[in-house]
Amino acid sequence: MRVQSGSCTRWIVMPELLPDTAEIGPNGHLIVGGVDTVSLAQEWGTPLYVYDETTLRGRCQAYVRALAEHYPGEARVCYAAKAFLCTGIARLVAEEGLGLDVVSGGELYIAGQAAIPGLRTHFHGNNKSRDELLQALDAAVHSIVVDNVHELHVLSQLADQRDATVPIWLRISPNVDADTHVYRKTGLLDSKFGFPLAGGAAADAIRFALSCARLLPIGLHAHVGSQIADYAPFLDTVDALLGLAADLRSSGFALQELSPGGGLAVQYVPSDPAVSIDALVQQICARVSRSCARDGLPLPRLVLEPGRSIVGPACVALYTIGARKEIPGVRTYVSVDGGMSDNPRPALYGARYTALLANKADLAADALVTVAGKLCESGDLLVRDVFLPDPQSGDILAVPVSGAYQLAMSSNYNQALRPAAVLVHAGKARPLLRRETFEDLTSRDV
């Protein structure tokens, strides 16, 4: 989407950054899912998170289709719930044939509320409590992804007490680097996650698991980071996991399932590199097939765990602009009615976004501004240095690619109320999450 301004062309927002159904209406308003986003802001209030059902389902289908086309063996896609989870989203991804990758008792509870069978759920986490492990056993999850020696011992004891055989994966730390923010790197040797491949800790853990009468080690898992645009780390991870499996055949380990995790990047701003779900899946499938053939391993069930790349591009966050502060020769700030309470990513990672005005989507973007949140922190800046069409109080700011790790990481800092979320499709909107109330803020007070 672009407009002409005098002799120069300025991008408002690239179409690739907006949901698949986005368009500009005849009144100049941003339309998503056939619904006027300005009308949504008026009806539901702001901040408001608008998820496009068509985009969500399309990206789920892209992963399922790519695996079916490129992998000769059995495969499954499991949605990484940590990106964003509520009952409605859980049901939607399940309808598209996806399982769930959960990392807490809370996420597992929501999976149950959405009536997702335990057998379609994988339970991750580096410090699962005893109660969470019991919850996973009660739910009969497909596999518990064991992260450390302590968990191996606790789970073995619980399995003995239950007289139950427990299928497990072991999370491996393969010491694969990824070109992403240091806080999003999870596959290095110096990581809180997983059994290190270096030094033999991973191999020792698998041998110990094989010695436990009630543990059934069926799979290997690794996740090397998030917002990764380069395919190489995924392929290096596949090589590391399959190499470990080949080395442990003589110990009695038979690899049945393999997961190189998720973490595929999405474009947040035009300068971010474009990434392809199909290209990534094709390369992973080819590497697994070649490596298994080379090492004489049967093809395992291949499990991919995308999160951000499914929900991130499917959502636009809406805010109402309030104050405008101009500092001549320095900067112009426009402040909105949300901020780091609903989107902490810019403050945590220096994450970059772009924006447009939903009520002026057809106008020339000729004012360079920085979008500030309303929270009492100097670092509460949502979008730095973006061109907008003369933003004024009352305008509706739309921030694309807001579907992942925003509501999931939202808080009540400054006792802010967490936003509502709606799902739009074919000209209709239905609620996913209601807006919090002041009464919610004191509901846990004693």
Image: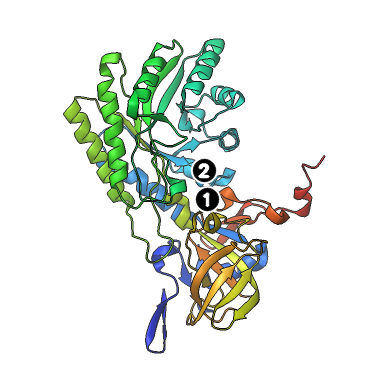
What residue is rendered at 60% in x and 58% in y? 340
Which residue was labeled with disc 2? 82
What residue is rendered at 64% in x and 56% in y? 419
8 vs 363, left or right, is left
Q: Is residue 443 above or below residue 9?
A: above
- For mark 1, give the secondary structure: loop
Most foreground residue, 64 or 350: 350
**Kind of residue at disc 1:** Tyr
Q: Position of residue 157 (x, y in %)?
A: 53, 13
Name the residue at the left extreme: 294
Sort mark 2 into few (<14), some (14-19) or many (20+) by Cα contacts within 10 Å.
Answer: some
Viewer can see residue 35: no
Ranked by sequence position, the earlier of labels 1 and 2 is: 2
Which residue was labeled with disc 1? 405
Q: Position of residue 71 (x, y in %)?
A: 26, 38
Q: How is the image coloured?
A: rainbow
**Kind of residue at disc 2:** Lys
Q: Are marks 1 and 2 in contact (CB under 8 Å)?
A: yes
